[in-house]
């Protein structure tokens, strides 16, 4: 049951009985019948409270005061710097001592905040249920993904979605971000010697032999065709090491406007904090399609590894086929596709197709393969998207990176209905927001509380002075 769809009934404020609490400073209170020496404590209390606010709040606002509140990992800093919002938001705490979650989070967290506090792609995308255009035809039956996005990869328009900024484990579709990140650094003909650690990578593997040599082209084909985690590890090591690659992937996600994503592994294997969103993965899909080498690798029907030998052993030659041939060969206009699965992510999927010069992309997160397989669900949703009238208004846009800082605080948070910042993607802007320049001022909650503390000190001192004058 999706808790976001369950209405919550709260009593109306008018139906709540008023509660009167007597105050030590209430002059009409029976406990305070009139002026007395005992009431002289009032100004002192005011002064003390003000001093406490002035001294305690700066410490509470420091990073060290909250560093232990939420566990973090990886090379990307989560701390708020200057007046920008921290992205991505913190992940839930681990629920066991295992290295990774063993089951889906029953309450996946939400993302959907850019550094300036706006909702990337438009405020409508903050919704956690279905988000459809007005007067849209009925969706295909048996769409089982907990989160999904259908987007126009050329205009950047988001045609329909479900929980687009909900944060879920990506599984192996994260390899799109891996490819986008490291492909420019690794020429196809470069030769890589496979380490023992890479050859022993957990999960799906193409069967790399430790100590043997493979070209970068061969490793990328293994990465995309059979989702080889051993190939992912070998490519990451060639890129400078797994930690370096993970750091680069996080930086690439930010650069593409993926503010819901945090990476811990280059293969997509689960991590407690490794989360993404269907919105972010749509950005990564669009970036991947702009790389001709990625498209060529992903569309390869099959590949062959010759026999290999090293000091660790030998393997005979073998062929492996593309796991996404059902989509690539069975769906009209199919461009690319990639599957994923882990215990925590469940089934995930990303694909794209082109018809009549228009390219649509789909991302599924936390999906099922029954009663229809993922490629069949994608095919039906693509048919639905391509049939939409050209005049159909999008529900959002793939905004790309959003620059700017938090808007001035007004006590109500970011203004609903704004996406803010400067979008450098090709999408159609759905809404605009206000971005502060460096010279603008901003009142934060900490600043406001400190000002209140100062006022309390002054007020207390003034009351004490006035009472001294009256007693004279």
Image (cartoon, grey):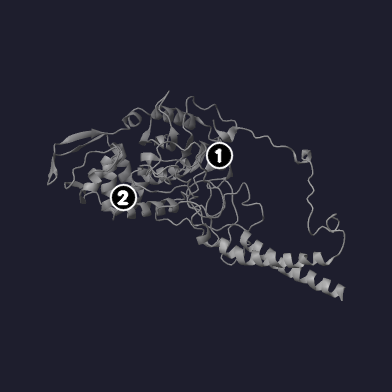
Q: Nearer the viewer, residue 124 or 411?
A: 411
Q: Furthest-bottom residue in view?
A: 472
Residue 343 at x, y percent in the picture? 38, 35
Q: Name the residue under label 1.
A: 395
Say left or right for 264 vs 13: left
Residue 216 visible in this rendered orientation of the protein = no
Identify the image quadrant of the N terminus: top right
Name the quadrant containing residue 458.
bottom right
The answer to which of marks 2 and 1 sits earlier in the sequence is 2
19 lies above or below 371: below
As helix, strand or loop, the secondary structure at mark 1 comes to loop
Mark 2 element type: helix
**Disc 2 to disc 1, how far (Cα)?**
32 Å
Residue 319 percent location from the top left of the image: 20, 34
Q: Looking at the picture, how far across and down is residue 180, in whole percent?
A: 35, 48
Residue 353 higher or lower than 75, as above or below: above
Provide residue 296's location: percent of width, then percent of height. 29, 41
- Disc 1 residue crowd, few under 14, some 14–19, many 20+, Cα 10 Å: many
Res 366 quadrant in image: top left
Give the residue displayed 57% in from the left and 61% down from the top: 60
In front here: 37 or 218?
Answer: 37
In the foreground, 155 or 363: 363
* Residue at the top extreme of this rendering: 371
Residue 450 visible in the picture: yes
- Please, is residue 13 above or below residue 249 in the view? above
Q: Residue at x 63, y 63 (%)?
A: 447
Q: Which of 355 and 179 is in front in this view?
A: 179
Label 2, on which residue? 183
Whether pointer 2 and pointer 1 mark residues with C-beta atoms closer than 8 Å, the reply is: no
In the displayed structure image, the side of residue 237 where residue 38 appears, left or right: right
Circle number at residue 201: none
- Quadrant holding the C terminus: bottom right
């Amino acid at each position: 049951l999706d808790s976001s769809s369950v209405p919550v009934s709260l009593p109306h404020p008018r139906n709540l009985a008023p509660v009167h609490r007597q105050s030590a400073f209430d002059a009409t209170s029976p406990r305070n019948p009139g002026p007395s020496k005992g009431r002289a404590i009032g100004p002192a209390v005011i002064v003390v409270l003000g001093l406490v606010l002035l001294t305690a709040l700066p410490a509470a606002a420091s990073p060290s005061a909250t560093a232990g509140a939420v566990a973090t990992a990886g090379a990307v800093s989560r701390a708020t710097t200057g007046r920008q919002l921290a992205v991505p938001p913190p992940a839930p705490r681990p629920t066991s001592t295992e290295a990774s979650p063993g089951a889906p989070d029953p309450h996946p967290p939400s993302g959907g905040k850019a550094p300036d506090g706006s909702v990337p792609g438009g405020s409508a995308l903050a919704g956690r249920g279905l988000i459809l255009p007005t007067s849209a035809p009925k969706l295909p039956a048996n769409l089982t993904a907990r989160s999904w996005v259908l987007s126009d990869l050329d205009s950047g328009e988001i045609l329909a979605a479900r929980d687009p900024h909900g944060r879920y484990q990506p599984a192996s579709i994260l390899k799109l971000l891996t490819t986008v990140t490291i492909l420019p650094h690794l020429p196809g003909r470069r030769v890589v010697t496979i380490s023992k650690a890479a050859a022993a990578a957990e999960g799906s593997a193409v069967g790399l032999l430790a100590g043997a040599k493979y070209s970068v082209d061969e490793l990328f084909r293994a990465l995309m065709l059979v989702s080889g985690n051993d190939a992912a590890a070998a490519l990451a090591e060639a890129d400078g090491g797994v930690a370096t690659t993970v750091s680069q992937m996080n930086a690439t996600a930010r650069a593409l406007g993926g503010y819901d994503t945090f990476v811990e592994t280059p293969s997509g294997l689960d991590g407690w904090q490794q989360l993404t969103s269907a919105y972010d993965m749509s950005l990564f899909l669009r970036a991947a399609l702009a790389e001709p080498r990625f498209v060529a690798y992903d569309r390869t029907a099959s590949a062959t590894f010759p026999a290999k030998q090293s000091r660790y052993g030998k393997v005979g030659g073998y062929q492996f086929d593309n796991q996404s041939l059902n989509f690539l060969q069975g769906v009209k206009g199919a461009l690319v596709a990639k599957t994923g699965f882990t215990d925590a992510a469940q089934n995930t999927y990303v694909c794209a197709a082109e018809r009549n010069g228009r390219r649509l992309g789909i991302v599924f997160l936390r999906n099922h393969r029954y009663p229809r397989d993922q490629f069949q669900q994608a095919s039906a949703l693509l048919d639905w998207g391509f049939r939409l009238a050209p005049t159909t208004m999008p529900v959002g846009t793939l905004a790309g990176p959003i620059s700017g800082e938090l808007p001035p605080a007004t006590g109500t948070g970011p203004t609903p209905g704004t996406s803010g910042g400067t979008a450098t993607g090709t999408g159609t802007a759905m809404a605009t927001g206000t971005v502060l320049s460096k010279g603008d001022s901003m009142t934060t909650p900490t600043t406001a509380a400190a000002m209140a503390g100062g006022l309390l000190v002054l007020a207390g001192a003034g009351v004490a002075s006035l009472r001294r004058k009256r007693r004279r």
